[in-house]
Image: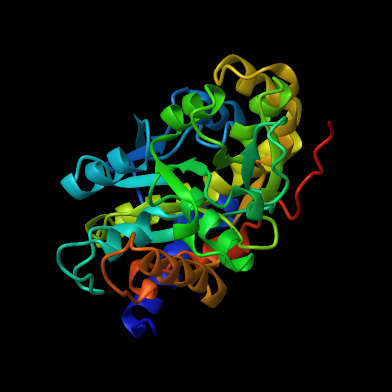
């Protein structure tokens, strides 16, 4: 879908404001007064404070010209509920599948004029092996074909679900040939370690401790199947206020700066993963290298990634309706992203 000209005009205004605030000190006299602006940003903690700790360590959000408050959520569902209730203004790091499934399963179809939230930024994971399929080392299972008729566990309607659907399709195997055990990660992990299920689908970072402990081995990853993004989303009414819009643009720049800091300070990120994320040092070191991402402009490729998810989830019976995924995006900060590039490549993991 195309975006209306008035929106494109606002894109330029937001970009200029953000560049004046952060990227080009010489333009500081053009920066609006944001001292009266307050933003509440949701962030998924995944059971630890590592995400916020990394942002704090990066220094990217020191001395913001507006008031910023972080709200921790254990997962995407809670964050989306807070967005819908107006309890938070933005959410950073929303998982890849959450927006498209909220749109596809909405009680009323989304329209450009009536959307509960929109994707204003996408951080592309530079390590393409983002999700892993894990089995027991002594199981004799070597490929997805060996899992036919066996129990495979993951959380319903997640990027893990999406990956397994794509992997099964690539192997020419209908999903109903597997016994899918759909449950949250914490329960799925316990079921796998307890050998109640034969395979677990999870983020590669979550698979690392299972491999290290000898409980699992990786037989496939998402590399080559799809690019993974985490989303920066906003409530539309926040963007309707020029001052808050300018503050959000500045947040985009600072998020990109934090990702650059992560890529250049892997030892410190690993320390945070060890202390706040409660990971083993050897796992934390590898995960720090593999978690590098960078914000990219919202373009046809990014939108197509979500449309493909929508189509796959519809075929799998997870999505209730066919959608136009482009409705869930707002590219007004593309100029900000282009003017402030992030890390340009993944740093290869070492064992």
Which residue is at the front of the view, 176 or 232?
176
Q: Quadrant of the C terminus?
A: top right
Q: How is the image coloured?
A: rainbow
Looking at the image, which residue is at 36% across and 42% down? Answer: 76
Tell me residue 1's x, y (percent): 39, 84
Say whether residue 118 is visible.
Answer: no
Q: Is residue 34 left or right of residue 112?
A: right
The quarter holding residue 274 reads top right
Tell me residue 39's x, y (percent): 31, 41
Which residue is at the front of the view, 191 or 272?
191
Say whether residue 301 is visible.
Answer: yes
Tell me residue 336's x, y (percent): 53, 62
Q: Is residue 158 left or right of residue 200?
A: left
Which residue is at the front of the view, 50 or 39?
50
Q: Is residue 86 left or right of residue 345?
A: left
Looking at the image, which residue is at 51% across and 34% down? Answer: 197
Looking at the image, which residue is at 35% across and 67% down? Answer: 328
Tell me residue 112's x, y (percent): 26, 74
Residue positioned most to the front: 149
Residue 324, compared with residue 306, is above or below; it is below
The quarter holding residue 139 reads top right
Residue 68, compared with residue 339, is above or below; it is above
Looking at the image, which residue is at 47% across and 64% down? Answer: 333
Residue 84, compared with residue 192, is above or below; it is below
**Tally of marks:** 0
């Amino acid at each position: 879908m195309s975006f209306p000209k008035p929106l494109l005009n606002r894109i330029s205004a937001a970009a200029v404001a953000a560049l004046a605030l952060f990227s080009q000190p010489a333009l500081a006299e053009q920066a609006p007064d944001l001292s009266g602006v307050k933003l509440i940003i949701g962030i998924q903690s995944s059971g630890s404070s590592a995400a916020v700790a990394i942002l704090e360590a990066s220094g990217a959000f020191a001395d913001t010209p507006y008031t910023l408050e972080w709200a921790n959520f254990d997962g995407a569902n809670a964050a989306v509920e807070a967005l819908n209730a107006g309890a938070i203004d933005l959410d950073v790091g929303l998982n890849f599948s959450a927006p498209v499934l909220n749109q596809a399963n909405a009680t009323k179809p989304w329209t450009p004029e009536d959307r509960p939230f929109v994707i204003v930024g996408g951080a592309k994971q530079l390590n393409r092996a983002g999700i892993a399929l894990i089995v027991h080392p002594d199981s004799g299972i070597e490929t997805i074909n060996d899992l036919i008729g066996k129990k495979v566990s993951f959380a319903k309607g997640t990027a893990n679900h999406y990956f397994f659907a794509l992997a099964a399709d690539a192997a020419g195997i209908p999903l109903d040939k597997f016994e899918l055990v759909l449950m949250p990660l914490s329960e799925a992990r316990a079921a796998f370690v307890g050998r109640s299920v034969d395979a677990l689908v999870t983020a590669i970072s979550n698979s690392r401790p299972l491999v290290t402990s000898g409980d699992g081995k990786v037989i496939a990853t998402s590399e080559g199947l799809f690019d993974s993004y985490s989303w920066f989303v906003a409530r539309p009414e926040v963007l309707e206020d020029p001052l808050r819009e300018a503050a959000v643009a500045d947040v985009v720049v600072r998020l990109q700066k934090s990702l650059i800091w992560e890529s250049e300070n892997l030892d410190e990120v690993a320390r945070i993963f060890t202390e706040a994320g409660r990971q083993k040092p050897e796992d934390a070191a590898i995960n720090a290298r593999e978690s590098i991402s960078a914000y990219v402009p919202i373009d046809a490729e990014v939108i197509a990634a979500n449309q493909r998810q929508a189509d796959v989830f519809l075929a799998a019976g997870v999505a209730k309706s066919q959608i136009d995924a482009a409705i869930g995006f707002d590219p007004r900060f593309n100029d900000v992203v282009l003017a402030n590039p992030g890390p340009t490549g993944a740093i290869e993991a070492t064992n």
